[in-house]
Image (spheres, rainbow, N blue to C red):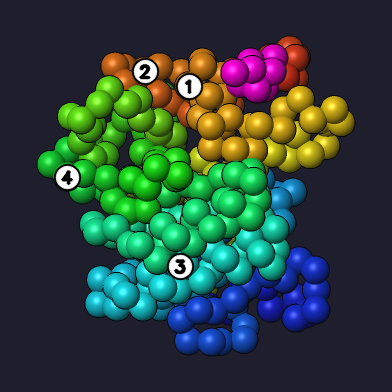
Amino acid sequence: MRLFPEFKHDDDRFHWKDFWKSETEPLDEDGHGTSMLSTIMNIAPFADIVVARIAGVDDDLLRETAVTQRNLAKAIEWAVICHEVDIISMSLGWEKSSDIISDAILGVLKKRSRRLLFFAAASNFGAGTQELFPAKEKQVISVRATCVSGRHLEINPALSDLDNTTVVGTLGDQVPAAQRGGTHIDQVLTGTSIATAIAASIAAIVIGYINANDHRGIWEELRTLVGFERLMLRDGLSTLVSARKRFLTLEKFLGPEGVARFEACLMNGATA
């Protein structure tokens, strides 16, 4: 599928690069990327989105692990250095860690004084498995899938036995999304990949609000992992649904008092 056919290559809205086959026009052979992109565009339509293709189809992540991991590392550096992104959403994962990706993440965080948020899909293989990489990377927010009421789905990986870390999930059950080759929302998806796209979109709303309204820099730390995690875990952007499991949602900010509650939430998260 060719995406954005009406865009010109010098259009400021056109941010796409192929690290897989060096195509010059946006191409999606798998459909996964199209679904994630359509979700983010629907939730955060104001966001300037940068898209990188690191593999042709899903199986390439296993068949060409070294290549696709190297491509992701390059894509991270390209997105941050060339386009100064605030958020990186990764709806993918591998069982084994990758030093080249970890180094890329640490490198760009250093360049940005840690003002950069990473989100990645935890895993869809159930409680008999552990989190995938890069979701299990310390600098990345691991995203799990929930139903619409916030209950964590059984497809999520097991909780860690090594510590009492609280995990965060968001809607990842029967989520409407576009298909490759389609122009409308015409399928529903379940899993931590679509939940990751939604979590990144929620972060985009937060960062967008900060960009537009924080003239004194009082919410600046919320751009960092430490600040955003604090925002999520203090009954701000999330609610505790069961032991060590939280539900990331903006529902509490609906209604006439929503803006005031949202700003109070940001202030609470920005306070160490």
Instruction: Tell me the mark number nearer the camera, choosing from 2 and 3.
Output: 3
Residue 232: image location, x then y, percent: 51, 25
Q: Which label number is shown at residue 72?
A: 3
**Quick one: 173 or 263, which is closer to the camera?**
263
Q: Secondary structure at mark 2?
A: strand
Three-letter code for the amino acid on which mark 3 is drawn: Leu
> Magenta part of the protein: which range?
264-272
Is any part of residue 87 visible from this angle? no
Q: Secondary structure at mark 4?
A: loop
Q: Return the residue at label 4.
A: 129
Q: Return the residue at label 2.
A: 241
Position of residue 154 relative to residue 99, above or below, is above
Q: Is residue 125 left or right of residue 209?
A: left
Rate crowding at label 1 as few (under 14), some (14 to 19) or many (20 or more) other CA atoms within 10 Å.
Answer: some
Does the stretch in magenta take in 271?
Answer: yes
**Quick one: 113 or 5, which is closer to the camera?**
113
Q: Return the residue at label 1.
A: 233
Q: Earlier in the sequence, mark 1 or mark 2?
A: 1
Residue 185: image location, x then y, percent: 54, 55
Residue 238: image location, x then y, percent: 49, 23
Q: CA distance from mark 1 to mark 3?
A: 29 Å
Q: CA distance from mark 2 to mark 3?
A: 33 Å
Q: Earlier in the sequence, mark 1 or mark 4?
A: 4
Q: Is residue 108 left or right of residue 208?
A: left
Q: Earlier in the sequence, mark 2 or mark 4?
A: 4
